[in-house]
Image (tube, rainbow, N blue to C red):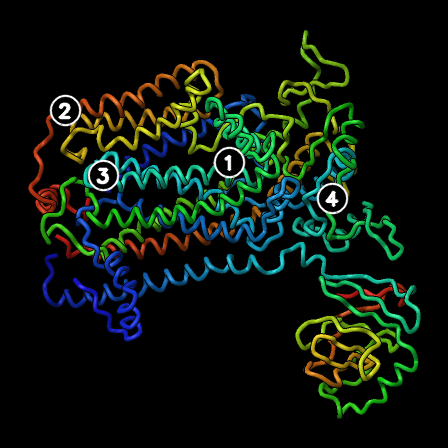
Amino acid sequence: MSFEPKNPVVKWVDHRLPIFGMLHHALYDYPTPKNLSYWWTFGSLAGFMLVVQIVTGIVLSMHYTAHVDLAFNSVEHIMRDVNYGWLLRYMHANGASMFFIVVYLHIFRGLYYGSYKAPRELLWWLGLVIFLLMMATAFMGYVLPWGQMSFWGATVITNLFGAIPVVGDTIVTWLWGGFSVDNPTLNRFFSLHYLLPFVIAGVVILHIWALHHHGSNNPTGIEIKDKQDSIPFHPYYTIKDLFGMGIFLIFFSAFLFYAPNYLGHPDNYIPANPLVTPAHIVPEWYFLPFYAILRAVPDKLGGVLLMFGAIAVLFALPWLDKSRVRSARFRPIYKQLFWIFVIDCVILTYVGGKPAEEPYILIGRLATVYYFLHILVLLPLVGLFEKHKPLPASISEAVLDKKPAAEGASNA
Amino acid sequence: MTTTTPVEEDGVKRRDFLYVAAGGVGAVGTAMAIWPFIDQMNPSADVLALSTTEVDLSAIDEGSEVTAVWQGKPVFIRHRTAEEIKAAEDVDVATLPDPQADEDRVQNPEWLIMLGICTHLGCVPLKEAGDFNGWFCPCHGSHYDTSGRIRKGPAPLNLAVPPYTFIDDGNVVKIG
Amino acid sequence: MLKMIKSISAAAVLSVMAITGANAAGGNIDYKSVDWQHTGIFGTYDRSAAQRGAQVYREVCAGCHGLELVAFRTLTDLGFTEDEVKAIAAEYEFVDGPDDEGEMFDRAGKPFDKFPAPFANEKAARASNGGAYPPDLSLIVKARPGFENYLYSLLTGYEDAPEGFELPVGMNYNAYFAGHKIAMAAPLSEDAVEYSDGTKASVDQMAKDVTVFLAWAAEPKLEERKNMGLKVILFLIVLTGIFYAAKRKIWSDVH
C-alpha cells in the first residue's frame, strides 16, 4: 500500500519531507502478524509510559529545586501547594515503577517467544540499551527528593565504581564532584536525569526502526510468508493496544490514587542526613534482583562485575540460544526452563529486599548461580538436544488450527 | 463472521457508533487529563496566601512617598500635599485619555495608593517627574498627573488602583 | 487471553509477595492496630479528632517538635474557621524584617506562616534534649514503617523496663521503639490537655487524636486524591469497555 495524501498541504509537505508517509507506514500500513497476543501490547505501553514520565517530569522540574538545602522541601512544596502537584509527583514516582513493570513483561515476552534471534539481534540490543538507560535514569531520579534513601542509595551505587582497580577512587570522586555525595552530585544528577529520557526516546526510535525492518515476531515464531498472515497495524492493533492501555491505566490508577507510597520507602520521607545511615537500605523494587546478585559475592569487585555481567550476558543471548525454533510454544523443555528462570528472578527480587543475613545469603547465591547457569549453560545445551514440536506451515495455518478449539477467544 | 446482509448493515451502524463513542470518550478523557498539567503553572497555594501586604502610614510625611511590595509588584503610597490634591481635582475629566475623577481613585484624598506599573509595557515610572508633576515613565515617555492619570504619551490607561482598606484607625493600609 | 490473565496474576502475586516481603524487612515489631477513619477507599479524616489532635500538638509536642512544612492557613481543611486559624498563628512569634531602619523585628504569626521549629537548629535542639534530636513531625506518619499504627503504639507504648533490661540514664523504655530505648519521656499523661468539646483526655484518646492530626499533616491531599481516584477509575472502566467493544467489532472480520 503506498501513501497518497489527499490534503494539499500534506501533499506539499510530504513531497519535500516524506514524514507523513513515514508515519503512515509505521502506524497505519505496517503489516503486522495477525496472531499477536496481548503480550505484544507491552511494547506500546512502554512507549506510552516514556511519554508520561517525560511530560510529568518536565512539569515537576518547573517547581523542583536541585539544591541540598532546598530539594526536600521543594518536593513537599509540590505535594502541598502546587496545583495538582501531589497528582503529578505521585504520577511520576509510581510511573517509574509502572514503566519497569511494563518493560520487564516486554523483556520476558521476548525471552519466551525467542524474539531476540536472527534477524532481530540488534533490535534486542537496542532494547537492552534502553533498559540500561532506564536504570540510570530511575536511579538518578530517586536521588532528587534528597531523602535518606536518596542520599544513601546515591552513596552506595556511586561507590560501586570504586571497585574498579587503580582508577576506582578517582572515578568516584569525579562522579561526586567532591569527596562525598553532596550538592554538586545532586546538581549533575538532576541535569542527567533530565537529559537521559530524551536519549531513551532516541534509542526507542532506532528500536522501532529495527523492528519495522523485519517486522514483529509473533507467538508462533514463524515469519510472515504471505498476505494472509498479516493485517495492517491500524485499526487492528491500534484498538487492541488502546484496550490494553485502558486496563493498564486502571491498574496504574489503583496505585496512584489508593497506594501512592506502597512502592516507595518510608525512610525517603526523612530528609537526607550524611551522618546517619538507615538501619536497612534497599533500592527500589526494580533493582532488587541485581542488588541480590551484587550481594551474593563476598568481594567488592567480584560483586560489581557479576551484577553488570548479569545484564552483559543478555547481549550474548542471540548466540547462546542455539535452537532454530523461536517460540517456546514448540519447545517443551525450554518452556519449562523459562518458567523456572522467571521464578528464579522473583526469588532474586525477594532476596534483594531482605537483610544480608542467613538464610537469604545462601538463597541469594543459589539463585544467582542458577541465573547464570540458565543463560550460559542450559540455554545452549537445550538448543542442541531438544526435540521441538512440529511447526505449522504458516501463521494463518496456526491460527486456523486453533480456531475450533478456542471458540470465542478472539485472537490468542 | 457469518452474518447475512441486513445484519451486516446493523453491524456497520454499530461499528460507526462504537468508533464515535471510543473517539469521543477518549478525547474527553485526554482533555480532562491535560488540565492538571496546565493548572500547575498557575499561582500555588502559598503564593496566593501571600496576597496581602500591610504598610504603616504614620511614618510617611506629607509630600513624600514609599514604594511597598504587593504580590511582587511595586505599589506607590503617596501622602499628597494640598497642592497636589487641588491640582488633581481641578482637571476637567472630559479632557482625559482615560476619564476618571480624582475622587474615584482615592478613599482618602491625602493618600494616593496605586500600582507603580506603567500601563504601556510594565516599566516602573519615576515620581515627581514629567509635565504634570506626577510620574513619568522613562521607557517610552508616558506622563502621569498627581492622581496617577495618564495625560501624555503612549500608555492607554491610568495607573491602576489596587484593592485596599485602612485599618488601625487609618494608620495602616492593608493592600489586597 | 484467559491464559495470559492467569500468568499475569500469578506473576503479580509472586512479585507482590516478593516486594512486600522485602519492604517488611527491618520492622519486625507488630504495632497496635487501630481502625482509622481515614484509611480505606472512601476514608476521610475525622475532623473533630484532628482538631483535638492539633490542640495536643500545640500544647504538648510543640515544645520540642516542629511542624515546619505545615502552614497555618491549611488548618481550615480540618474545619478550623479563619478566625481560629488567625488566633492559632498568633500564638507563635516570627522574626521578620528588615524594617526601614534595617533591623529585624518580632511579629505575631500570620496564616501564611508555617508552624515554627522550637529550636534554632539541630545543635541547639540536641543541647536542650540531652543529645537527642526531636524530629520535625510534618511527615512523621509517612516516614516510619507502620505509619499511623506506629505513632499510636509509640505514644501508648511506655512501660517499665523488663527485668534485666539495661536502661541508660536519661533513657526511657518503650515497647515499640527500635531498640526500646527512647530519649523522649512519656509525653502524654492523663488530662495533659483540656478538650473544649468535653472529650475525656485520656492518654489513649490523646494519642489517637494527635495521630490523626499528624496523619493529615503528612498527607493533606488524601481526601482530594481518593475522590479524584474514584472518578478517574470509573471513567477508565467505561472507556476501556468501549474500547473492548470496538476491538471486538474491528477484529470480527479477521479469520
The Cα atoms of the two marked residues, 1 and 2, are separated by 44 Å
Which quarter of the rendered picture does the C terminus of chain A lie within?
top left
> Is label 1 or label 3 in front?
3
Same chain letter for marks 4 and 3:
no
Q: Amino acid at mark 3?
A: Ser
Residue tagged 4: C115
Q: Quadrant of residue A339?
A: top left
Say whether disc 3 or disc 2 marks the residue closer to the N-terminus: 3
Q: Amino acid at mark 4?
A: Phe
Residue tagged 1: A264
* Residue A384, numbered circle: 2
Q: Secondary structure at mark 4?
A: strand
> Is label 4 or label 2 in front?
2
Q: Residue at x 76, y 27 (%)?
A: C126
The percent coordinates of residue C4 (x first, y second) are 26, 39
Image position of C55 (left or right of B112):
left
Chain of the residue displaying label 1: A
Q: Residues within 10 Å of mark 3 (few under 14, many from 20)?
A: many
* Residue A47, numbered circle: none
Say whether disc 1 or disc 2 marks the residue closer to the N-terminus: 1
Q: Residue at x 30, y 31 (%)?
A: A314
* Residue A115, numbered circle: 3
The Cα atoms of the two marked residues, 4 and 2, are separated by 71 Å
